[in-house]
């Protein structure tokens, strides 16, 4: 949100919010309370937390975030894509409150309980595709990637995986093997899970496929033709370099800024 000293915000460009007008700079961030908390944080927190800038959040509602010194910002990142409903949506707060007062944990891997069944039914009904679906609920993105990685091996009986330069998949050992975002994320953690290949993000495949350009979508390039579907020709089609089993600490740069992950 704030990378440098903010320009003053005119009253005209402010919007009302439950916390007061927004955006609103009460004191140049990081303010005194933020500085104090950052000092305490740095005393005890693992250096694995790679903060981008000194925003110390007190509370948030909808798209408004307020820091501990009373500065207010618009959160254009939706809680890093986790609060798509807006921060502290009343329905979400009510559901969390109700569940926490009924049952906090009994372990879904060992036992059954109604909200878990209901959530899996709901996810199954709203995800694309027909036919039976199975749901695995996980605690984090990295855990979901690990599960997908394992499931692909289990289901196909094949051991190789392809991921793209510039992609961030998480920091656990399997997910980190697939990640190719920033070199420092992998530094000193080799050997990671072997048998994977990093490829440029479909650049060559898209340029040889006129339909991919006319679709206007950067997310759904057409798959390679059947003749290009074998692992060896796929590598050629994508311009993939021989990185299989690459556990080096080096991470190739992304092919274009559009494919860079913001994850630190
Ligand atoms: C595309 C993608 N995959 C996986 C992850 C890892 O998620 P988590 O931090 O919840 O483990 C992230 C997190 O930024 C992500 O953006």
Image: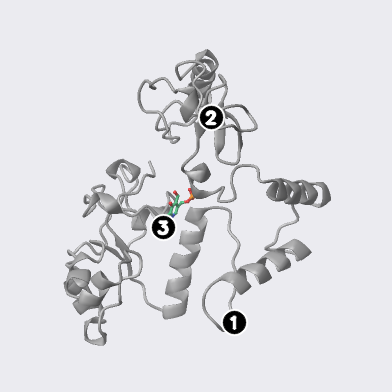
Query: Dot 3 surroundings within 10 Å: few (below 14), some, or many (20 or more)?
Result: many
**Residue position for label 3:** 174
Q: Residue furthest bottom?
A: 227
For residue 65, side relative to residue 90 (left or right): left
Residue position for label 1? 132
Indicate the quadrant where residue 110 lies: bottom right
Q: Nearer the viewer, residue 148 or 173?
A: 148
Q: Position of residue 75 (x, y in %)?
A: 50, 38
Q: Could you tell whether 52 is left or right of 118 in the image?
A: left
Q: Could you give the CA–CA distance between mark 1 and mark 3, rounded to whole angstroms?
A: 28 Å
Is residue 113 visible in the rendered image? The answer is no
Residue at 58% of width from left, 45% of height from top? 86
* Residue sitting nearer the eye, 109 or 93: 93
What x and y, as percent, mark residue 104? 76, 49
* Number of numbered markers: 3
Above or below for 176 versus 88: below
C-alpha span from label 3 to label 2: 42 Å
Judge from the rendering whether residue 139 lies leftward or rightward of residue 180; answer left or right.
Answer: right
* Residue most extreme to the top: 32
Circle nearer the viewer, 3 or 2:
2
Q: Give the secondary structure at mark 3.
A: helix
Say whether disc 2 or disc 1 marks the residue closer to the N-terminus: 2
Q: Which residue is mark 2?
A: 22
Query: Nearer the N terminus, badge 1 or badge 3?
Result: 1
Judged by depth in the image, the label closer to the viewer, 2 or 1, is 2
Residue at 82% x, 47% y: name it: 101
Image quarter (top left, top right, bottom left or bottom right) of the C terminus: top left
Quarter of the picture containing the N terminus is top left
Residue that appears at 52% across and 19% down: 34
């Amino acid at each position: 949100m704030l990378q440098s000293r903010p320009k003053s915000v005119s009253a005209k460009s402010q919007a009302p919010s439950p916390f007061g007008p927004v955006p609103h700079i009460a004191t140049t961030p990081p303010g005194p309370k933020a500085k104090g908390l950052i000092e305490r944080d740095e005393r005890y927190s693992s250096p694995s937390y790679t903060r981008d800038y000194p925003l110390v959040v007190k509370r948030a509602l909808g798209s408004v975030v307020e820091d501990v010194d009373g500065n207010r910002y618009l959160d254009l990142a939706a809680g890093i894509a986790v609060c798509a409903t807006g921060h502290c949506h009343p329905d979400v707060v009510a559901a969390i409150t109700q569940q926490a007062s009924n049952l906090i944990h009994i372990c879904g891997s060992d036992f059954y309980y109604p909200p878990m069944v209901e959530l899996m039914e709901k996810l199954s009904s709203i995800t694309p595709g027909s036919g039976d679906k199975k749901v695995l609920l996980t605690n984090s993105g990295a855990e979901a990637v690990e599960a997908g990685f394992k499931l692909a091996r289990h289901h196909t009986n094949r051991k190789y995986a392809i991921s793209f330069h510039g992609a961030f998949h998480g920091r656990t050992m399997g997910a980190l093997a697939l990640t190719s975002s920033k070199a420092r994320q992998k530094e000193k953690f080799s050997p990671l899970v072997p048998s994977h290949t990093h490829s440029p993000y479909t650049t060559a495949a898209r340029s040889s496929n006129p339909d991919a350009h006319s679709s206007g979508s950067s997310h759904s390039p057409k798959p390679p033709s059947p003749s290009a579907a074998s692992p060896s020709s796929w590598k050629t089609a994508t311009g993939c370099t021989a990185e299989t089993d690459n556990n080096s600490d080096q991470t190739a740069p992304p092919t274009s800024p559009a494919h860079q992950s913001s994850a630190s």
